[in-house]
Image (cartoon, helix red, strand yellow):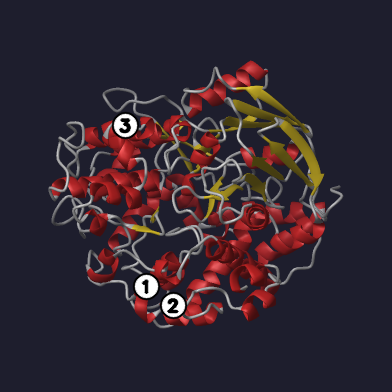
């Protein structure tokens, strides 16, 4: 049993990269109860240890790997989170991944790893049974993420170990580089966390252990596990989701106008009647590349897609994972690419290089529109014909982005910075919030998404509180009540993400809210109510907000690209953000002028120490 409470190891590993020194320390029970884990616990540490004058690519920035108490112990809860100051936004950054790495970190003896400083040469960490070894990674620097993952584990003689690895994009400080795991099939992708890892000269964090992490009530957890498996195997939607995964959602959300096309500018895919939609959908064209399914740790849903393209110019290694919905949409309709094999190739390249497919696809779409509008030409793009739908050109520019070659070096900065270099009105076509390219869900199709994107601490994220499912039950084009809805969904998401739950555990009703709280209590041994969980979520959300405000954010940044506010697409409407934003600020307890959480709100949430930072 953990010396802390159930579900936790009770240990943090601190690694000083300057000195190549690793030290374990206890995890405070008080902090764990207050911030849970993941980006709650990691966010608290980041807030305390990274002052505003520290840049994202600075040795004094932190890079944290954090699990939740449910990670690796409860069903459909195999997640871990990477937390840092983002090189893409300059504000709070986090990325979340599933697979097997998070559970293995806890078995290796830690809940959290904190990296500080910067190594003078490439290194990797090997964390096993409570110990940490620091090895040279010179021979692995320059390898893609999959090659490095396999080579390091082989050379260690630890084939069953799990590696979190950067590819060449992280080494080259591409601002939307991610950190891969499970042989570059899963990725903590968003916010440029891989660039921070590359800056610190850390190629991989390899974990291996046999430590048993116990629930406070093991018998009750076994009962819950059986019930969750029964629910998943008897629910028709979940059974369908196991077969099709996130690509099976594509056609459904396309029909309601939720999927962007041609850099968020059009409401068709391939022309009148959307002839390209079935070419990449499941069921449909996606079936041509689908060869199997795979599960994350202790997950009966098994939504991961194994894909195969064996021959031709878009072939890639067998038995690797294919595009999820976000990638399917980002490189599909948003880039105008109609060939699922091209999309699958782009997905695998991003995994090998360690690139966030949402930001990568969005950045390519931005460049394609700039090209078609004459803002750039082949003289700027190294001869690449960057027109919408040109899959070969998209592949070529992804290589250049990861390697920071030619025009790819500009796009490697992300759309917000690329605008400053391209000029000539390119800002109108850069679809981002706070520098973060937004996820593939259109706020014109469901109004609550708009206020969520505008105010989410890390920019336009779908995993921090997407309101779409709730809005589908009512009038999704109305703004009435959407501010309150966004806050509620965000606070709940902040709690369950911090706990280690997978998004799909809650989104698709494998768990109800009551059973999720019951599971948390059974694992940890605390007696948390739903309202208390929501308060924790609100605390975490506002801690991120406080970090941003402390680091220079302003209320003027709580907005959306003009295109989403003024130009219609498939849904035939625009996002009426101005009708929701004042109400959202009021409900959140944020100052109407500055956007800062008020002193009263901070004190109510137990964030007393942030008051002086924000209000003097």
Which residue occupies 51% across, 82% down? 586
Residue pictured at 53% horizontal, 44% vertical: 302
564 with respect to 323 (left or right): left
How far apart are the two marked residues, 3 and 1, measured between alpha carbons?
37 Å
Residue nearest the observer in this picture, 276 or 594: 594
Q: Earlier in the sequence, mark 2 or mark 1?
A: 1
In the image, residue 356 sits, relative to residue 458, either above or below, namely above
Front position in the image: 58 or 21:
58
Q: Which mark is residue 447?
A: 1
The earlier-in-sequence mark between 3 and 2 is 3
Q: Nearer the viewer, residue 117 or 151?
A: 117
Callout 3: helix, strand or loop? helix
Residue that badge 2 annotates? 482
Q: Residues within 10 Å of mark 1 (few under 14, many from 20)?
A: many
Seen in the picture, residue 569 relative to 202 is either above or below; the reply is: below
Circles 2 and 1 in contact, beta carbons < 8 Å: yes
Q: Dot 3: within a 10 Å radius of its alpha carbon, few (fewer than 14), some, or many (20 or more) residues?
A: many
- Residue 601 point in image, percent of width and height: 63, 78
Residue 500 at x, y percent in the picture: 64, 53
> In the displayed structure, does residue 441 sit left or right of residue 10?
left
Kindly report which numbered mark, 3 or 1, lies closer to the viewer in this rendering.
Answer: 3
Residues 87 and 506: in front is 87
Label 2: how many Cα within 10 Å (few below 14, some 14–19, many 20+):
many
| Residue 279: percent from left, percent from top | 25, 44
Give the residue pinned by disc 3.
400
Q: Quadrant of residue 165?
A: top right
Marks 3 and 2, how far apart at CA:
41 Å
């Amino acid at each position: 049993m953990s010396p802390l409470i159930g579900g936790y190891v009770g240990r943090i590993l601190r690694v000083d990269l300057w000195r190549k020194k690793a030290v374990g320390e206890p995890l405070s029970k008080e902090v764990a109860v207050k911030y849970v884990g993941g980006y709650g616990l990691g966010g608290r540490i980041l807030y305390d240890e990274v002052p505003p004058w520290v840049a994202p690519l600075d040795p004094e920035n932190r890079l944290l790997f954090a699990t939740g108490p449910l990670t690796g112990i409860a069903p459909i809860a195999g997640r871990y989170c990477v937390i840092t100051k983002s090189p893409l936004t300059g504000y709070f950054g986090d990325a979340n991944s599933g697979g097997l790495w998070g559970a293995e970190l806890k078995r290796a003896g830690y809940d959290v790893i904190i990296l500080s400083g910067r190594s003078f040469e490439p290194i990797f960490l090997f964390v096993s049974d409570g110990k940490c070894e620091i090895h040279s990674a010179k021979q692995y620097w320059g390898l893609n993420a999959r090659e490095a993952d396999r080579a390091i584990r082989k050379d260690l003689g630890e084939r069953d170990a799990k590696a979190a690895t950067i590819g060449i994009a992280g080494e080259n400080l591409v601002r939307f580089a991610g950190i891969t795991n499970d042989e570059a099939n899963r990725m903590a992708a968003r916010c440029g966390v891989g660039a921070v890892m590359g800056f610190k000269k850390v190629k991989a964090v390899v974990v291996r252990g046999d430590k048993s992490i116990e629930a406070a009530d093991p018998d009750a957890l076994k009962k819950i596990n059986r019930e969750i498996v029964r629910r998943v195997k008897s629910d028709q939607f979940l059974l369908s989701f196991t077969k099709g995964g996130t690509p099976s959602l594509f056609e459904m959300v396309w029909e309601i106008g939720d999927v962007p096309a041609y850099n968020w500018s059009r409401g068709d895919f391939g022309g009148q009647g959307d002839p390209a939609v079935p070419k990449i959908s499941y069921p449909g064209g996606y079936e041509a590349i689908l060869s199997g399914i795979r599960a994350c740790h202790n997950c009966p849903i098994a939504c991961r897609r194994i894909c195969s393209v064996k021959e031709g110019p878009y072939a890639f290694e067998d038995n690797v994972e294919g595009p999820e919905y976000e990638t399917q949409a980002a490189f599909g309709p948003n880039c105008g690419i109609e060939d699922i094999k091209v999309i699958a190739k782009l997905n695998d390249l991003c995994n090998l290089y360690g690139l966030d497919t949402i930001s990568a696809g969005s950045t390519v779409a931005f460049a394609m529109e700039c090209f078609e509008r004459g803002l750039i030409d082949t003289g700027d793009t190294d001869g690449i014909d960057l027109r919408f739908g040109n899959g070969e050109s998209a592949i070529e520019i992804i290589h250049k982005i990861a390697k920071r070659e030619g025009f790819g070096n500009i796009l490697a900065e992300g759309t917000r910075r690329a605008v400053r270099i391209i000029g000539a009105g390119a800002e109108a076509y850069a679809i981002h919030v706070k520098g973060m390219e937004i996820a593939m869900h259109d706020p014109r199709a469901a109004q609550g998404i708009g206020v969520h994107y505008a105010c989410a601490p890390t920019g336009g994220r779908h995993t921090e509180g997407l309101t779409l499912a709730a809005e589908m039950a009512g009038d999704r084009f109305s703004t009435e009540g959407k501010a309150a809805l966004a806050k509620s969904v965000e606070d709940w998401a902040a709690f369950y993400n911090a706990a280690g739950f997978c998004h799909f555990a809650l989104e698709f009703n494998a768990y109800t809210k009551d059973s999720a709280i019951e599971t948390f209590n059974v694992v940890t041994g605390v007696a948390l109510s739903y309202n208390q969980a929501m308060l924790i979520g609100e605390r975490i959300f506002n801690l991120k907000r406080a970090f941003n405000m402390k680091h220079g954010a302003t209320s003027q940044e709580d907005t959306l690209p003009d295109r989403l506010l003024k130009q219609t697409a498939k849904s035939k409407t625009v996002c009426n953000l101005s009708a929701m934003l004042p109400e959202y600020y009021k409900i959140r307890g944020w100052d109407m002028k500055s956007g800062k959480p008020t002193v009263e709100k901070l004190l109510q949430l137990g964030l007393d120490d942030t008051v002086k930072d924000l209000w003097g």
